[in-house]
Amino acid sequence: MLRASRVLARRVTRVPRAAAAAPLSALARQSTPLRQTTVGPAEQQWARGLSAGSSAESHADSISEEYSEARELLTDAEEALGTVYFEEDLQDATEAVKALLARFDEIKASLSDEEAHQLNIMVGLKMEELKSRLDVLMDNLIHDEED
């Protein structure tokens, strides 16, 4: 097996003399040119909007951090369903989700329409996920009390 790997290594590392001796400019002429594509105005606007320093992106980063915390609290509450810890976990999760949703709405209101749209694209689904998970948890609580 060792011998086979040595033979393979020699074959892989061998470079034909013509290619090694050819100047770089000659090799560049032989390669196929890259296909040029045109970028439309919509793509340009989207690329400008997602630039590294955009306000929407910085807000999305901070909201994503808070989203992770709220999601963890919701998970804790879901896992605690039926235990003595559930009530406290549910209260913590509810407060975190409501505070984050209120902050998200405040930030969207303070941004321009374009930036608010970008923020909604970046984290809007996360906010909807939190809302729906909290609603499902509350529905489970109501249905458990009825049984």
Image (spheres, rainbow, N blue to C red):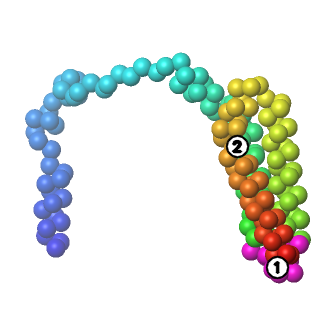
Residue 37 image point, x, y percent? 38, 22
Main secondary structure type of the part rendered in magenta: loop
Position of residue 62 in the picture relative to residue 24 (left or right): right
Task: Tell me which residue sits at (59%, 22%) in the image.
Answer: 45
Mark 1 belongs to which amino acid?
Asp
Task: Name the residue that disc number 1 marks.
Answer: 147
Task: Tell me which residue sits at (74%, 56%) in the image.
Answer: 132
Residue 60 image point, x, y percent? 71, 41
Disc 1 packing (10 Å; few <14; some 14–19; many ≥20): few
Q: Quadrant of residue 69?
A: bottom right
Secondary structure beneath label 2: helix
Residue 29 image point, x, y percent? 20, 23
Quadrant showing the N terminus:
bottom left
Mark 2 belongs to which amino acid?
Gly
Secondary structure beneath label 1: loop
Circle on res. 124: 2
Position of residue 141 in the picture relative to residue 16 (left or right): right
Find the distance from the CA under tag 2 to the CA under tag 1. 35 Å
Quadrant showing the C terminus:
bottom right
- When the figure is inspected, residue 146 is found, relative to residue 122, above or below; the finding is below
- Do we see residue 14 in this rendering? yes
Q: Which span of residues is magenta-colored?
A: 79-87
Q: Quadrant of residue 111?
A: top right
Q: Which residue ends up furthest to the bottom in the rendered image?
A: 83
Circle on res. 2: none
